[in-house]
Amino acid sequence: MKKNTFIVLFLITLLPLLSQSQIPNKTSYTIGVGTTLYFGDLGGANYIGRPLFFDLERSLIRPVVTLGYHHQISRRFGYQIQGSYTAIAGDDKLIQPHDVFAPEWFRWYRNLNFQSKLWEISFQAEFYLTKYEPGSLMFRVGPYVLAGVGMYHFNPKGLTNDGSLIELRPLHTEGQGFTGSDNKEYSLYQPCVPIGAGIRYNLTSDFTIGFEYADRKTFTDYIDDVSTNYVAQADFTNYFSDGATANLAYDMSVQSEQLDPSGVYATVTAPTQQRGDPSDLDHYIFAQFNFCYTISQRKVSQKSQMKCMKWGGEGGQNTKRKR
């Protein structure tokens, strides 16, 4: 994470120095549509510990919509400010274990699920691998790499036994904030570091299409409300003054009894047993197509000057008539 942060700060520091390069001074407004790929503790493909797409449950891929403001500083550098809306989810039920005690069996037996809406706003600096200028038919193709900083909001919810959807953070499912616990409550607002690559192609002098793939590095393992160990039912009873809330919190923290009502393997989900993996933080990826409308600041300036000259001329004629 420190390395990623250094890269972002380095690119941002370069921005004021870019005036020494050729300056297209082009602004674009962008609409992006694509998919969100989420990687966390819940769900995933069979087996365990496989990277990226090999550990992806494809049925949980969700759409993402993005609105952005893009400015091309030079033919090598640009930046973008964008806001995105998407959804993410994970469900252990979708895992198909090959055998009892197989690596994926423990996640299936855990039987947890979550879903969440996710809002993000970010700033991204772009470095182009070839000279590129929005609206230009000479420098019309622009492959680039990007890095930035952002902030996102999430709110994990889980399905109860009767199918109701309930917020998980207020239930402290892993004892977050309990007396004597080192597990702190997590915030629903978190920073992220987008890192990725993309390409732009000018269809005309006004319209550009592109594709972008960017991983959002995060600093929390609680986007899916799962990270550390199981908590004893007595801990929930001691924390919550309302018995019904304490029972609900415990039920949402341990749901294996739905698959194993007789408790044959109950020791797997006993207090202090592993519930998640805090050493591997959650993250999500946007893969989307971008559609851009480009405005040349030079053209806007010229139009403004022409408009001023026009009104100035008419004003002079009106003055002459009054005389």
Image (spheres, rainbow, N blue to C red):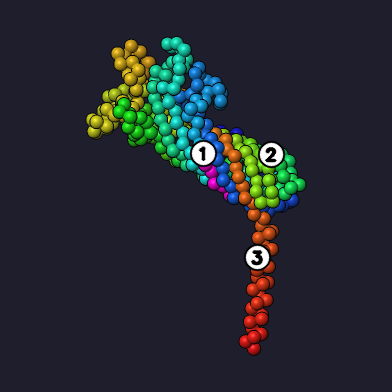
Q: Residue at x 54, y 46 (%)?
A: 67
In the rendered view, does 260 fall on the left or right side of 242?
right
Q: Are marks 3 and 1 in contact (CB under 8 Å)?
A: no
Front-most of 304 and 267? 304
Residue identified by numbered label 2: 143
Q: Quadrant of residue 106?
A: top left
| Residue 255 appears in the figure | yes
Q: Amino acid at mark 2?
A: Pro
Q: Amino acid at mark 1?
A: Val
Q: Amino acid at mark 3?
A: Ser
Q: Are marks 2 and 3 in contact (CB under 8 Å)?
A: no
Residue identified by numbered label 3: 304
Q: Are marks 1 and 2 in contact (CB under 8 Å)?
A: no
Predominant secondary structure in magenta? strand
Residue identified by numbered label 1: 64
| Separation (CA) of disc 2 from disc 3 | 33 Å
- Residue 69 in the magenta stretch? The answer is yes
Image quadrant holding the N terminus, namely: top right
- Residue 28, image x, y percentages: 62, 50
Front-most of 84 and 246? 84
- Which numbered disc, 3 or 1, marks the residue that appears first in the sequence? 1
- Residue 9, image x, y percentages: 61, 42
96 relative to 168, above or below: above
- Residue 181 in the magenta stretch? The answer is no
Secondary structure under the numbered disc 1 in the rendered image: strand
Which residue lies most toward the right here? 138
Q: Residue at x 45, y 15 (%)?
A: 97
**Crowdedness near tag 1: few (<14), some (14–19) or many (≥20) residues, C-alpha within 10 Å:** many
